[in-house]
């Protein structure tokens, strides 16, 4: 929510459709929310979305990402 009281909406427009049991191996985004397999340049599937959701939920509750170093 912005200082003016309006909700800010973010577009994660870099989505990729992966069908069946296929794997992806490209990435683009903020490392704070990326699963380890993406950062290690390993193939991944939709499970990385659950990782990112968990990081976001943690940040909403605590106020910073779980691996914040600062």
Image (cartoon, rainbow, N blue to C red):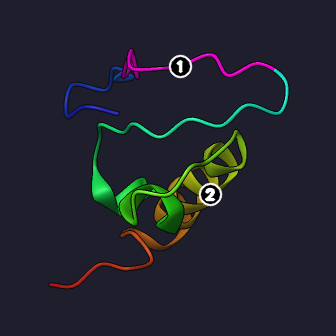
Report the number of discs. Answer: 2
**Extreme-bottom residue of the structure:** 69
Query: Looking at the image, which residue is at 29% across and 40% down?
Result: 29
Q: Secondary structure at mark 2?
A: helix
**Left-right relation of 3 to 34:** left
Q: Quadrant of residue 49?
A: top right
Q: Nearer the viewer, mark 2 or mark 1?
A: 1
Which stretch did the figure color magenta?
A: 9-19
Seen at 45% across and 77% down, the residue is 66
What x and y, as percent, mark residue 21?
83, 33
The residue at 77%/18% (across/down) is 19
52 relative position to 11: left or right: right
The answer to whether residue 19 is above or below residue 40 is: above
The mark found on residue 16 in the picture is 1
Q: CA distance from mark 2 to mark 1?
A: 16 Å
The secondary structure type at the circle numbered 1 is loop
Judged left or right of residue 16, residue 23 is right
Dominant secondary structure (helix, strand or loop) of the stretch shown in magenta: loop
For image coordinates 72% across by 49% down, the residue present is 47
């Amino acid at each position: 929510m912005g200082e003016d009281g309006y909700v800010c909406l973010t577009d994660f427009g870099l989505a990729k459709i992966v069908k069946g049991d296929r794997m992806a191996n490209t990435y683009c985004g903020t490392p704070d929310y990326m699963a380890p397999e993406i950062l290690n340049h390993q193939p991944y599937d939709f499970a990385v979305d659950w990782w990112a959701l968990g990081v976001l939920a943690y940040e909403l509750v605590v106020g910073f990402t779980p691996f914040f170093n600062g």
